[in-house]
Image (spheres, rainbow, N blue to C red):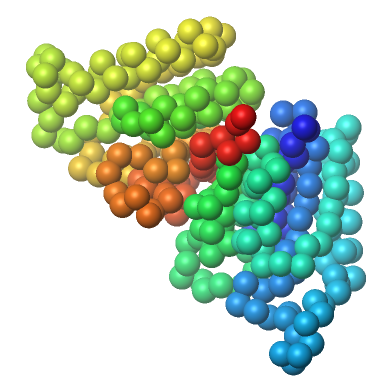
């Protein structure tokens, strides 16, 4: 099955930037691109007021025109890319989560139309990043260019989901032809690397072992490691993301509550990273 790259488009500047990132991702993966507009407001706007009227509103001509223009623009910028566009009677978040069941990748902007200005990430992006059943690319920020030649950054902590994130990060770096940077965060007061039992010594071993495993699978890939010193892992990774083209996180790392679909570090990066964030979910399509 040739699973598509799916992107939510609502006409907002953030969603149009996300559509361009999605087109690039689809071209790199040799996959079709699907532009999807969920036209029922997540709070119910657009739903018939009369409770006895069970019919759904029709797709709008304005949205159809917006989708057609976006598709035409992307076909012109990525010749040969197959682009489909459609409206779906559903809330944007729920629509994209459903689309993720059949997608290779779902792409969302960091904030679309509506919402509160104080929210760094829109409710749709949060919902999709937490609940999708395939990897999710959250495109942020939209107010400055991303260094295209920067490395793909991924945090390493020895957890199963961190290993999943490393695998996705390595594939993405190889696909883009950029280096992979493996990072592990240690406390500022950690024992020195000379103390093999200390945090820094443990970090060095973890980074070395992870880098060797990546090089075995991707011998052509330039892999570097970095131990970051910070009281909080999220703070260090957000700062490191300033020089990255992409940061990859797992849907949940060590610690936290089982009910949380995104761990605290992943949530912080999705909210505050200075480059796009790829949330690596376990492959629901496997088997």
The answer to whether one can see residue 13 in this image is no
Q: Residue 103 occupies which quadrant of the picture?
A: top right
> Could you tell whether 184 is left or right of 154 in the image?
left
Question: For the view shown, which residue lies furthest in the front direction?
Answer: 287
Q: Does residue 246 lie above or below 257 as drawn?
A: above
Q: Does residue 210 lie above or below 46 as drawn?
A: above
> Could you tell whether 134 is left or right of 235 in the image?
right
- Out of 62 and 100, give the one closest to the viewer: 100
Q: Does residue 287 lie above or below 280 as drawn?
A: above
- Out of 170 and 253, give the one closest to the viewer: 253
Residue 85: % across, % down: 84, 53
Residue at image coords 67%, 37%: 104
Residue 273: % across, % down: 45, 46
Residue 216: % across, % down: 48, 8
Residue at image coords 35%, 40%: 253
The answer to whether one can see residue 68 in this image is yes
Q: Where, quadrant-wise, is the N terminus in this rendering?
A: top right
Residue 226: % across, % down: 33, 24
> Could you tell whether 122 is left or right of 230 in the image?
right
- Out of 192 and 54, give the one closest to the viewer: 54
Residue at image coords 75%, 39%: 4
- Out of 24 and 107, give the one closest to the viewer: 107
Residue at image coords 89%, 63%: 65
Question: Number of marks in the image?
Answer: 0
Q: Where, quadrant-wise, is the C terminus in this rendering?
A: top right
């Amino acid at each position: 099955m040739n699973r598509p790259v799916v992107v939510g488009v609502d006409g907002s500047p953030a969603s149009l930037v996300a559509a361009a990132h999605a087109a690039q991702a689809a071209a790199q993966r040799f996959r079709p691109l699907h532009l999807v507009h969920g036209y029922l407001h997540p709070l119910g706007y657009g739903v018939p007021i009369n409770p006895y009227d069970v019919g759904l509103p029709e797709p709008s001509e304005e949205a159809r025109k917006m989708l057609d223009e976006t598709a035409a623009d992307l076909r012109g910028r990525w010749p040969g890319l197959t682009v489909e566009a459609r409206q779906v009677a559903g809330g944007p978040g729920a629509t994209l989560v459903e689309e993720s069941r059949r997608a290779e990748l779902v792409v969302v902007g960091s904030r679309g139309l509506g919402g509160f200005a104080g929210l760094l990430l829109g409710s749709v992006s949060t919902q999709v990043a937490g609940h999708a059943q395939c990897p999710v690319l959250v495109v942020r920020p939209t107010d400055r260019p991303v260094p295209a030649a920067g490395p793909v950054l991924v945090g390493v902590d020895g957890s199963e989901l961190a290993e999943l994130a490393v695998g996705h990060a390595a594939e993405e770096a190889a696909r883009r032809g950029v280096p992979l940077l493996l990072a592990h965060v240690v406390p500022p007061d950690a024992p020195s690397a000379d103390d093999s039992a200390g945090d820094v010594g443990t970090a060095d071993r973890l980074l070395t072992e992870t880098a060797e495993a990546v090089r075995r699978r991707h011998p052509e890939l330039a892999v570097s490691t970095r131990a970051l010193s910070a009281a909080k892992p999220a703070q260090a990774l957000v700062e490191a993301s300033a020089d990255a083209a992409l940061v990859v996180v797992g849907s949940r790392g060590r610690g936290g509550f089982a009910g949380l679909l995104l761990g605290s570090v992943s949530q912080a990066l999705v909210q505050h990273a200075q480059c796009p964030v790829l949330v690596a979910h376990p492959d629901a399509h496997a088997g």
